[in-house]
Each structure stands twice: as structure tokens, then as C-alpha cells.
Image (spheres, helix red, strand yellow):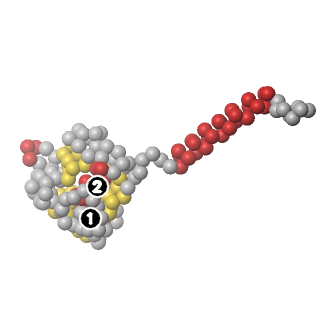
């Protein structure tokens, strides 16, 4: 400041620029702490093969996949069915349509998904991304010579 209490002009210009830079850095920090997409974990707690769009108490694999397809972000499906369980499909194949990605992970359990000899077990829609981990896929039917375990409809 000069003798009259006025701020130096060069300092007056530098302060707003410094504040803008500080605000920009704060926004970058906040953006990196809170990602734009939300990843969700769905827990299968029933070996039944029933549909629906929600995955609450008694959630089936079909319900979990439907809910994951509708949820933003890369989702994961895990199982709370005990150490050894077979899920036999009775309502057709399971359709993965999650373009952000879907991981179905049997983790430390012995989970088998059986097509019951009726149809392909999984269908992966165009642009979708499906990862199966620690899971047994059996008894699918490759009708017309297309995927018995997984039918790829144009996945990435």
C-alpha cells in the first residue's frame, strides 16, 4: 500500500489471479476425491431364479444382474449362499447389458450357475462388459451353435 492507503495496482491484479488458481486447484482436488460414477456391490442371497428389478432381501442372481444393468458405474455381484450352491436357471438366459462393466465373483464359495440344458447361460449385449470370476458355468445349451455358457451379442 502507498502512503494514502491505496493498494499497489500490480498487487491488485495478482490477487484475483491467485484466487482463481486456488479455486481451480480446489475443484480438481474435490473432483478426484468424488468420482463421477458410483460402483455398486449387489449380494445374491437366494439360489432361486426369479426376476424383478430390485435386489433387496432374498436377492436372486437374475435380480442382481437386472439391478446392476440399471445402476451407474462398474458393478460387482457377490454371493452369500454358503460354501456350495447351484443356481439352476428356469427363466432363460441371464442378460448382461452394463456398458460400465459388471463383475460376477463367486469369491471363496463354490457357486455353479446351471442352464439346466435349456439355453445359453449368459448373454452379453452389444457394448456391455461382463467378467466372471471364481464361478462354475455348466449345462448350457448351444442352440444353433451359439454360446452354451456365454452368448456374445457384440460385447466390447
Q: Residue furthest top?
A: 9
Sequence-first disc among 2 and 1: 1
The residue that mark 1 highlights is 59
Which residue, as the protein is rendered here, is positioned at the far right? 3
Residue 60 picture location, percent across and down: 24, 63
Q: Is residue 1 left or right of residue 107?
A: right
Quadrant hosting residue 127: top left
Q: Residue furthest front?
A: 4
Residue 54 position within the rendered picture, expressed as x and y whole percent measured from the top left: 27, 59
Q: Which residue is drawn at the image coordinates 32% and 63% (left, top)?
A: 43
> Contact, CB < 8 Å: mark 2 with mark 1?
yes
Whole-percent x, y for residue 4 in the image: 89, 32
Quarter of the rendering occupied by the C terminus? top left
Taking the spot 33% from the left edge, 47% from the top edge, the residue there is 101
To which quarter of the image does residue 3 belong? top right
Q: Residue at x 35, y 55 (%)?
A: 76
Q: Is residue 27 left or right of residue 19?
A: left
Characterize the local packing of mark 1: few (<14), some (14-19) or many (20 or more) Cα atoms within 10 angstroms: many
Q: Which residue is mark 2?
A: 67
User: Which quarter of the figure is the N terminus placed in?
Assistant: top right
- Count of numbered badges drawn on the protein: 2
The answer to whether residue 105 is seen in the rendering is no
118 over 82 or under it: above or below: above
The disc placed on residue 89 is none
Q: Residue at x 25, y 56 (%)?
A: 53
Q: Is residue 56 above or below residue 96?
A: below
Q: Helix, strand or loop at disc 2?
A: helix
Q: Is residue 72 left or right of residue 122?
A: right
- Residue 91: in sight, yes or no? yes
Q: Is residue 105 left or right of residue 121?
A: right
Q: Dot 1 lies on which element?
A: loop
Amino acid at each position: 500500500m502507498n502512503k494514502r492507503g491505496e493498494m499497489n495496482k500490480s498487487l491488485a491484479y495478482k490477487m484475483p489471479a491467485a484466487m482463481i488458481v486456488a479455486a481451480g486447484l480446489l475443484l480438481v482436488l474435490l473432483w478426484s476425491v468424488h468420482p463421477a460414477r458410483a460402483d455398486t456391490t449387489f449380494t445374491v442371497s437366494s439360489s432361486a431364479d426369479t426376476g424383478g428389478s430390485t435386489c433387496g432381501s432374498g436377492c436372486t442372481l437374475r435380480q442382481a444382474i437386472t439391478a446392476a444393468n440399471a445402476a451407474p458405474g462398474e458393478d460387482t455381484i457377490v454371493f452369500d449362499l454358503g460354501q456350495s450352491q447351484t443356481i439352476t436357471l428356469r427363466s432363460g438366459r441371464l442378460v448382461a447389458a452394463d456398458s460400465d462393466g459388471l463383475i460376477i465373483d463367486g469369491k471363496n464359495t463354490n457357486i455353479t450357475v446351471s442352464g439346466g440344458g435349456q439355453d445359453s447361460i449368459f448373454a452379453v449385449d452389444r457394448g456391455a462388459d461382463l467378467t466372471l470370476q471364481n464361478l462354475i458355468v455348466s449345462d448350457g445349451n448351444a442352440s444353433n451353435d451359439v454360446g452354451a455358457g456365454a452368448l456374445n451379442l457384440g460385447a466390447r
